Image: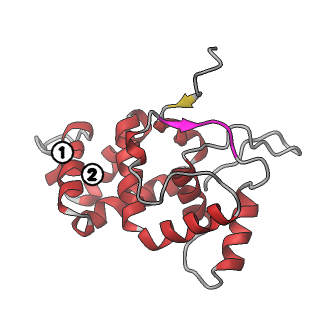
Amino acid sequence: MDDNKIPYVPFHAINQFMVDDFRHEVIQSVFNGLNNLEGGKRGAYQNLIKNAVKIPGFRNSAMAPTLVKIKGGISAFEKSPVFVAQTLSCWADLHSDLRQKVYDLLVKRGWEILPAEADRAKLPGFLTKWHPTDHYDVINQAFNETYPGDPASENDVRLMTVWLSDRLPYDAVDEEDGDAETVE
């Protein structure tokens, strides 16, 4: 490999790190929160749903009821890097308070990341090199200590960390069992 190239994996590689229930929760959250997104972003995402999510009986998948769209959305999330990137971008916008808290925490811990509001969906994918000391449990503990009583789940904090850092924990291997960390 050329030493000047940065290794990225496509955005849909995140599926290797997400359990099914949490993937469903994220997609449902975005579909339910579409009306809370800024107009341009909402329209662009609805067009993406129309083109990427296939639902029998609907020419325009964006018009299907949310419960019907979720199954097709999960399938698109598993296959399409563009759909993953836009879904996570919308998810982060819908969780702007959490986004700012996780951003502040990561910066305070020495992570070099893009500004919180940067459009990460324009990136080619996720980097594979994780922060050397801040594994999921460390980040969750630091988040809970910094923001006691915050209602965000561990999985929300983990996903926001992945999204803001544009990194998947490919090299964050648990020494005991050799498994990569998973967003549950």
Of mark 1 and mark 2, the one earlier in the sequence is 1
Quadrant in the rendering for residue 82: top left
Quadrant of the snapshot with the N terminus: top right
Secondary structure under tag 2 reads helix
Where residue 131 sits: x, y (%)?
A: 71, 48
Where residue 28 sits: x, y (%)?
A: 36, 60
Where residue 132 sits: x, y (%)?
A: 77, 47
Residue at label 2? Answer: 69
Quadrant of the snapshot with the C terminus: bottom right
Q: Is residue 148 left or right of residue 120?
A: right
Is the residue 14 above or below the residue 99 in the image?
above
Of the residues shown, which amino acid type is indicated by label 2?
Lys
Q: Is residue 184 left or right of residue 81?
A: right
Q: Is residue 163 left or right of residue 182?
A: left
Q: Can you tell which mark lies on residue 47?
A: 1
Residue 129 lies within the magenta run: yes
Q: Main secondary structure of the magenta part?
A: loop
Secondary structure under tag 1 reads helix
Q: CA distance from mark 1 to mark 2?
A: 13 Å
Residue at the image position 69 percent from the left and 44 percent from the top: 130
Question: Dot 2: within a 10 Å radius of its alpha carbon, few (fewer than 14), some, or many (20 or more) residues?
Answer: many
Residue at the image position 29 percent from the left and 65 percent from the top: 32
Residue 128 in view in this figure: yes
Q: Which residue reaches farthest right?
A: 176
Residue at the image position 59 percent from the left and 62 percent from the top: 155
Residue 97 lies within the magenta run: no
Q: Can you tell which mark lies on residue 84?
A: none
Q: Which residues are magenta?
A: 125-130
